[in-house]
Amino acid sequence: MSAIALPQSTVPTTAGWRQRLRYLLRAYPPLVLLCALWMLATVAVALLAGHLAPYAHNQIDLQARLAPPYFMGGSAQHWLGTDELGRDILSRLMLSIRISLLVALVSTLLSATLGVFLGFLAAHFRGWVEQLVLTLVDFQAAMPFMIIALAVLAFFGNTLTLFIALMGLYGWERSTRITRGLCIAANEQGYAAAAFDIGASPLRVYLLHVLPNIASTLIVGVTLTFPEVILLESGLSFLGLGVQPPMTSLGNMVGYGREYLQTAPWMLLTPSAVIVLTSFSVGMLGDWLRDRLDPSLR
């Protein structure tokens, strides 16, 4: 009897695991999981770059100048090869990931904070305040940000603090429009009006009642701005107006590698691949979050 009962008891278990696996793959597609793993690995490298890097990022070894990567016949001492000064590409790549992610993260948070504040301001006061904010939004959207950034950096010089603050002015108009529209809708609903009726201050209403209800939409907007800031930082660093030596960034590495594209292509291709994969991963995760958090798309 036990030999006969064993297969019968395992059939629903196997079917249950298959059903759970299908549900997991529907909820978390393999490509989304791969993008999440890539971002986790990227963040881990950024946090532990000082411990994981085999060499100092600015350590020069002219005897190992332009050494190819290990998979192209190079030495195992430099897995991703070296640059024109014999600096280890892997070590520079790890520090570049840290700097680029730091710039992108802080700039995106600054942009989102400014956008949310102005959106709250426009939704609460309306009238001429709202028109002023909307005029600033239209002006920001109409101006090519790359040209503004080039002019500011060329005129005021470049420090990491100024560069991050400048990047923080990118994309705030998107957050302002989203926040203003959602706040106007929230003011017409019962929970915000009830909070005002019982005497809550506007700051308390917007921060404790309205913001949690619109946070999902704002998070999706942040995930769209983040890869754009990475690409913008890479472009400015490529032009020599981004992160300055002795620090390095992904765009910096691409800028230096363009002169050796024919003789040492690994100098340019490695950081370029990291930029593409990181931007793609954040964008893919943002699209997935939008589908998960937007009730109309379920």
Image: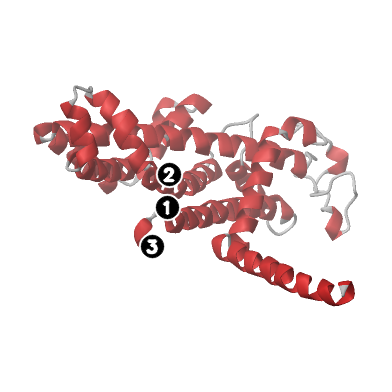
Near mark 2 (Cα within 10 A), the count class, few <14, some 14-19 or many ≥20, is some
The residue positioned 53% from the left and 35% from the top of the image is 103
User: What's the amino acid at mark 3?
Assistant: Leu
* Nearest to viewer (mark 1 / mark 2): 1
Q: Quadrant of residue 30?
A: bottom right
Query: On the picture, is 255 further left or further right than 94?
Result: left
Q: Which mark is residue 293?
A: 1
Residue that label 2 marks: 219
Is there any visible trace of residue 151 in the rendered image?
no
User: What's the amino acid at mark 1?
Assistant: Leu
Alpha carbon separation for disc pair 1 and 3? 8 Å
Query: On the picture, is 238 further left or further right than 112?
Result: right
* Image coords of residue 278 (percent x, y): 59, 51
The residue positioned 42% from the left and 52% from the top of the image is 293
Residue that label 3 marks: 297
- Label pair 1/2, CB-CB below 8 angstroms: yes
Disc 3 is placed on an element classified as: helix
| Rendering colour mode | secondary structure
Which sits in the foreground, 296 or 95?
296
Q: Quadrant of the N terminus?
A: bottom right
Q: Is residue 90 above or below residue 247?
A: below
